[in-house]
Image (cartoon, rainbow, N blue to C red):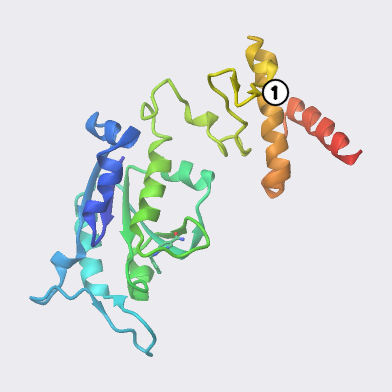
Amino acid sequence: MFFQAVTLFPEMFAALTEHGVSGRALRQGLWRFDTVNPRQFADNRLGYIDDRPFGGGPGMIMMAAPLQAAIGFARSRCQGDSRVVYLSPQGAPLTHRRVAALAQQPNLILLCGRYEGVDERVLQTHVDEEISIGDFVVSGGELPAMMLMDAVLRLLPDVLGDSRSAEQDSFADGLLDCPHYTRPAEFDGMPVPEVLMSGNHAKIAEWRLEQSLRRTLSRRPELLDGRMFSPQEARLLERIRKEQAN
Ligand SMILES: NC(=O)c1ccc(NCc2ccccc2)nc1
């Protein structure tokens, strides 16, 4: 996976490239990263890359020409297909399913907007898809881009190592994650659920699945809409619903 970020703040990406699982995977060569700064493509000495919006209104808009040139340069560095993703509050909500699809791509170019956004003509001609990480606005597309990158990298083979497989992640099975405990066995007078100390792996797996179903049903019931259930899940759901009905 070759990630490129078109960004005015390349240093921000050190958060991923120099730390944690993503940083180690980069050093191991499991993925590649580079940035392109639109300012180097500004066609004037002063490096203007933004201008006032036609029609008036607050703030500035990123100009089309420097972004078009930066995206073109990024594409020129890709072997094979490349997809340009624009992070914006107007994009399609990012889900685990979309992350898994993006993880199949060899090259992703992430366009990080600043100010009030970018000239629409860049989106129409050079952006393959627009993605939102949530219904809120932050100062730039860089943090949303890093969240997308981290979610994708976790799904790449060998990035998480065998200590943690991504399919145990929340959402990987379409459910919220179950509660987790570690030592001490009693903390502040609170014990760990007995079943987790039993060593009975079938019972532990069933308890964890039941907890995930309970949490999903109570916190995010909409995630269950349209989801197929295994016989075991259906049985557990039945038991939970009966319990809640009483
Ligand atoms: N919810 C998101 O994914 C997101 C993406 C970017 C962003 N800020 C940069 C920006 C602001 C306005 C227009 C286009 C980009 N804020 C939130």
Residue situated in front as seen by the camera: 109 or 117: 117
* Picture layout, residue 224 above or below residue 173: below
Looking at this rendering, what residue extends furthest in the left direction?
45
In the rendered structure, the answer to whether residue 15 lies left or right of residue 191 reads left
Q: Is residue 204 left or right of residue 119?
A: right
Vertical placement of residue 72 versus 32, above or below? below
In the picture shown, does residue 63 fall above or below 152? below
Tell me which image quadrant ligand 1 sits in. Answer: bottom left
Question: Outermost residue toward the top?
Answer: 199
- Quadrant in which residue 176 is drawn: top right
Residue 5: x %, y % from top left: 27, 54
Residue 200 position within the rendered picture, expressed as x and y whole percent measured from the top left: 66, 10
One can see residue 104 in this view: no
Q: Quadrant of the C terminus?
A: top right
Residue 67 relative to residue 130: left or right: left
- Residue at 64%, 21% in the rendered image: 192
The x, y position of residue 112, in whole percent, is 32, 61
Secondary element type, mark 1:
helix
Q: Is residue 1 visible?
A: yes
Residue 239 in which image quadrant: top right
Q: Residues within 10 Å of mark 1 (few under 14, many from 20)?
A: some
- Total count of labels: 1
Residue 221 position, x and y percent, is: 71, 47
Residue depicted at 34% across the width and 87% down the height: 54
Q: Is residue 120 above or below residue 223?
A: below
| Quadrant where the N terminus is found in the figure | top left
**Residue lying furthest front in this view?**
188
Which residue position holds label 1? Answer: 207
**Measuring 25% from the left and 67% from the top, which residue is drawn there?**
67
Q: Amino acid at mark 1?
A: Trp
Q: Residue at x 66, y 10 (%)?
A: 198
